[in-house]
Image: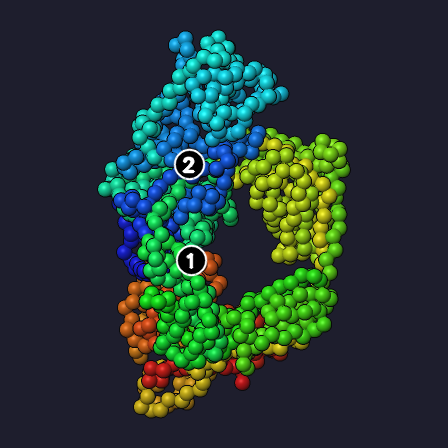
Amino acid sequence: MRYIRKKITILLILAVVFASFFSGAPVHSKVIYQTVTSETITSGVVLERITRFTDEGWLKINVLRANLNNPNVHIDTLTNKDSIKNLTNTKELAESHNAVAAVNAGFFNWMSETGKASPDGPLIQSGELISADHEYNRYNNSMGTFSIDKNNNVLFDFWKTDLELTASNGNTMTITQYNKASFKDYTDVVMWCRKWDEYSLGASEKYPDIVEMVIEGPFVTEIREGMPPVKIPENGYVIITRGKNAEFIKNNFKVGSPVLLSMTTRPDWENMKMSVTGSAILVKNGKIPSPFSFDIAGRHPRTMVGSSKDGKELILVTVDGRQQGSIGMTQTEAAALMLELGAYNALNLDGGGSTTMAARKPATENIEIVNSPSDGSPRRISNAIGIFSTFPPYPLEGFIIDTVDTNVFVNTSREFKALPYDAYMNPIKIDQSQLKWSVSGVEGYFKGNVFYPESTGTATITVSSGSVKSSIKVNVLPPPGELILSSNSLKINVGQSRSLSVVGKDNNGYSARISAKDVDWSLTGDIGELDLNTFTASKAGTGYITASLGDVKAHCAISVALETNHVIGSFDKLEGTFTSVPETIPGSYEITKEIDNKVTGKLTYNFNTTEGTRAAYIVFPDEGIDLKENTTKIGFWAYNPHENSNWLRGEVVDANGNKHFIDFSKTLDWTGWKYVEASVSGINSPKKLTRIYVVQVNPITSSGSLYLDELTITTATYPVIDKNQIPEDTLPVYEANKNVKPSKDDDYKKFILFGNKDTANTLLENLLFMNLYEKATQSSISEDLNEDANENEIEIKFLKDYNTYRAYDSNGCRFIELNTSKNSIRTSAQGQWQWFLKQLDSFNGDNLFIFMENAPNKFSDSLEGNLFKTVLSEHKDKIKNIWVFFNGTEDNVFMEDGVKYISSAGLNINNLTPDNADTVKYIEVTVVNGEPTYQIKNVIN
């Protein structure tokens, strides 16, 4: 856990209204809840992480702020060190250049022939123009460029470029592409230097008439026609062309003659330290342009760069998208966000799957991916914006104290690590053995950097070296009432190993990780070996692992099986057809002996003809290839002629006819043969493999072929675990679970919970409801505490069909009913979240009871369910008791972070009959003098 400054903001009904300077601006979604954390990467560079829950969904925003007024904060363009045509992900670019942080920057054009890419627009790195395009913005202002000049001024502009080569006879020719690939089959004029490649293009079967002019210094050293690639001079370049432009070279340039290269841009590149090119300028002088010069429509992940009004702060921003945790932004929303974050000028950069931010973990040299790239992993890109720290070395200033969890149970242990930093927040190295650790606030001691608490409470952990000290707060919890293993059952094959981790919960629901060394581990069953918390299977069979801490135990059932591989297809016959999405995608599926003279299937595709998601399929006949029972993996050998960013996927149909998509590889980043494999163990009874396909999910165009051989499945038969042989886990004991009988003078309130609506469909259900109503009446009359029987009437709250929301106060308690009919608070009723937060904030009593049909862990948006729990735990500081009731499949009580969650099954019993009617229960809650208790009782005694 990082030691960071944290600010939590709860926004109720008030919306964050983004600034807008054009008419007809849409109303942006209201912010329900927001958290902001801030950490210093190096002096003058701060990373802000913003998580925002809105009426539209979640947004994950990351902001890097760099102080350009600081002489030791340096900004530059990052490209692949070997060649700017090589794609590299943002994290690797930052690491290779020793940057402390970076975001992806410019767009790029994919070259399917070579698996390389051309950066889009002008590119300047360390004061050197390394790529440009004569046609870029030639006829309109469309694609903007971000630059920092040599006086450290920030510029956002639409660049124009003129590239000319003048022969000794005074005739000139226009260079159309500088360190880019040709877009016209090299009938235009292309110029490459060593930044692009070590060798020129050279003649080929496709381009037999290539003419290349080699220039070293100011002189032509060679004019080559139809010849192999030549080494590009270190202090020179090569001009590549064919057709009419080739004739111009041969007629006007001579070996040994001088040439004049003119590279001019508006603005002047010679005044710049760095430049990268994006698309639309989002904010210009504090206003959002209308219309944008270039609009990338839809909600997508976004990357933006901006600067403050005084030009002294650089603002680099990523917004995640295409995922539950962040829905992305439209371009207009992205512009409004940049204004909100303080940008006076801003530019849209490459987004979508390219959106990536990387930053150094504070007080370390480790670069981490900050955001969540939509492809699941960082995409390889052409260039990035890097932030550098050039501060001189400085003595020790302090420590960041790092640990896996700042909660710890008494009589266990917690390891801490001290990360030293200097006055500029840069990491330094010291002798860790010389550090002194101490604790105050609780009883306990240290062995090295491991803390052993002996009493509960809030502990202050301090590390020191000489006079330099740093501290953090740690909560020491009472002993756990239950242990939760990372898995309560394992299916594993002979020879495999699995490790279990442990989390404990005390009787108030507060949790902490527990070191495996603090737990007693044992294995029952002759199926393998247990080394602390790591099990290695050696023999087929069943058994279980027991984890114990004192008298509290948890168990993990284990089934061990042997795996067997079966080759079910050799691709030696044309058992499949080609199809594509869209249908216009060219391609084919055939049998060939092109590779190593082996008979293989060949899938050919061409994604150059359209944009958007594209796919090329092998469709297997007879509704697919049959899979054996208990298939756990599907794999095959794939020969890839050249690297590309496509995905390799499959489609599996289960026994119920449901389709499932499996990933063999999320990038085709190899050449030659490779065995690829996908797991289907999470699919219930996989029945048939229907398709194998190549899919292109990003805007890069590509074409090529893929060769397939030896389709193989892996099967595993797992012995059935007899659950009756597995001991029950220890359950926590809750003090509120007791029968309390109030006296005549007590202030009390009683109500009954039942997990159904108040209607019956059968005679048995009618009888059960009659019994339930009788229980309520008996409970009310039997107390006989007041002459007015109506005051003692027991309300039955049915946890079903809450289609509205409301709140009311009674006996000093607040009762809140929430509409979760759509498995969500947000989507079930507009404005409900804001209303709910207002109800929480306005209540100053001790007891809050919340009623809802669906449990928070059953919400369709798991993040919203977690937020619901987080919000309630935050209110535990002022509300003594918070209880949440919901409809469930069992009568159960659990606590999380001091909040009690109670589910009532009601009539939710499979095959309810007179024989099992005695298992139907209700929950009775009694509040006596402000103290709530509960009991789970049978409807039929």
Q: Which residue is drawn at 68% across and 71% down?
A: 543
In the image, 929 versus 239, the foreground residue is: 239
Q: How is the image coloured?
A: rainbow
In the image, 828 versus 252, the foreground residue is: 252
Does residue 766 appear in the picture of this structure? no
Looking at the rendered structure, the secondary structure element under dot 1 is loop
Count of marks, rendered view: 2
Other-residue count near label 2 (Cα within 10 Å), few / some / many at <14 / 14–19 / ≥20: many
Q: Is residue 250 above or below residue 585?
A: above
Q: Residue 12 carries which label?
A: none
In the image, 301 versus 42, the foreground residue is: 42
Q: Which mark is residue 106?
A: 2
Q: Name the residue under label 1.
A: 429
In the image, 447 versus 691, the foreground residue is: 447
Q: Which numbered disc flags the more N-terminal residue, 1 or 2?
A: 2
**Residue 871 coordinates in the image, percent (x, y):** 37, 65
Q: In this view, does 104 lie above or below 45?
A: above
- Distance from Cα at disc 1 to Cα at disc 2: 36 Å
Q: Mark 1 against mark 2, which lies toward the viewer?
A: 1
Q: Which residue is drawn at 44% across and 35% down?
A: 107
The type of residue carrying mark 1 is Lys
Q: Residue at x 47, y 31 (%)?
A: 195
**Residue 765 coordinates in the image, percent (x, y):** 54, 74
Does residue 168 appear in the picture of this structure? yes
Q: Quadrant of the C terminus?
A: bottom right
The type of residue carrying mark 2 is Gly
Q: In which quarter of the image is the N terminus?
A: bottom left
Looking at the rendered structure, the secondary structure element under dot 2 is loop
